[in-house]
Image (tube, rainbow, N blue to C red):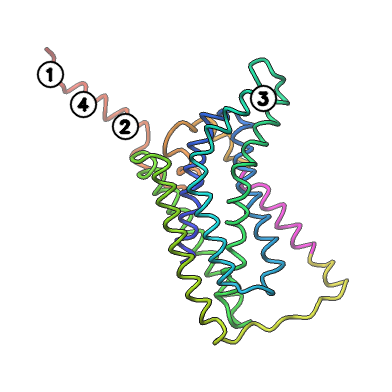
Amino acid sequence: MFFVSGLLSLVYQIVWSRALPPVFGTSLPAVTVTVATFVGGLGLGAHLVGRRIDRWSPWKTYALLELGIAGFGLLLPHLVAPLGALFARITPIGAPAPAVHLVRFAGVAVLLAGPCVLMGGTFPAFVRGFSWSRSRLGGDLGAAYAANTVGAACGALLAGTWLVPCFSLSRVSATAAVGNVALAAIAWAFSAREQQHTRIEPTSDAPPAAAAATWVPLSLLLITGYGLPEDEPPIDQRIALKAFATAIVAGDPVRGKPPAKRRKKTAKKAATRPSH
């Protein structure tokens, strides 16, 4: 289930990465803003939902988040062009570069912040509903994260190598939205049975010293995460107009043969072709 959630999330990212550059540009700042908004929204959503999920029904919360993502998935492809035209009027040709970058950041943030925050919130909601025993929490958390990550890689490859090149962006996004609605229905069905299970007992508030000590590993995680996406914007900038560009960055395995082999094969065919 969380595998499919990760798959759909990366399908959306491929669609957005393809839809936004023609409107907001393919410069390094424009692509960087897209990546920053996507990743930052995931983190913000996980933080906001994670702080409150113990007071909510986890499966119902997950279902509502998936429905919200589906709504954004249906609307966003139709909002990119009108919003891009609006920001083009705000920053005509000759406008200062800082103003243009600021407007681009605002435009991408307006479009992507909502769905990305909802996507980030699905992780703590799913883990809270999936894990019913504190003794299994670590294993369940690892399993959920692994399934989501593998699904994300598969979604990047699926969208970048087949869906986006073969179908319109709005159709791909609408299909992904149907998947989100299906996940929401399954999660809502799970919520009807969650009262039959033993819930993870709430823990008492940690003392100030222990709470302060948690900032050390969190700071290390922050530093580690800082280096992960730093290579993605330059690569995306060079291949942003390729339908499968972001899939190569996000999914890692490549599509087809390397360019050198393709050129060699093409040259060989041209040499063996009979002349007229």
Which one is earlier in the sequence, the residue at label 3 or at label 1?
A: 3
Q: CA distance from mark 1 to mark 2?
A: 20 Å
Q: Main secondary structure of the magenta part?
A: helix
| Residue numbers of the magenta segment | 215-229
Q: Are marks 3 and 1 in contact (CB under 8 Å)?
A: no
Residue 274 is marked as 1
- Circle 1 packing at 10 Å, graded few (<14), some (14-19), many (20+), is few
Q: Say if the magenta span includes residue 224.
A: yes
Residue 124 position, x and y percent, is: 62, 66
Q: Are marks 3 and 4 in contact (CB under 8 Å)?
A: no
Q: Which residue is mark 4?
A: 269
Q: CA distance from mark 3 to mark 4?
A: 51 Å
Q: Are marks 2 and 3 in contact (CB under 8 Å)?
A: no
SS state under label 4: helix
Q: Which residue is mark 3?
A: 90
Amino acid type, label 1: Pro
Residue 84 position, x and y percent, is: 57, 30
Amino acid type, label 3: Ile
Q: Considering depth in this image, is 159 or 76 the residue closer to the camera?
A: 76
Which one is earlier in the sequence, the residue at label 3 or at label 4?
A: 3
Residue positioned most to the top: 276
Residue ID at (70%, 61%): 48
SS state under label 2: helix
- Circle 2 packing at 10 Å, graded few (<14), some (14-19), many (20+), is few
Q: CA distance from mark 4 to mark 1?
A: 10 Å
Q: CA distance from mark 3 to mark 1?
A: 57 Å
Amino acid type, label 4: Lys
Which one is earlier in the sequence, the residue at label 2 or at label 3?
A: 3
Residue 262 is marked as 2
Residue 123 position, x and y percent, is: 59, 64
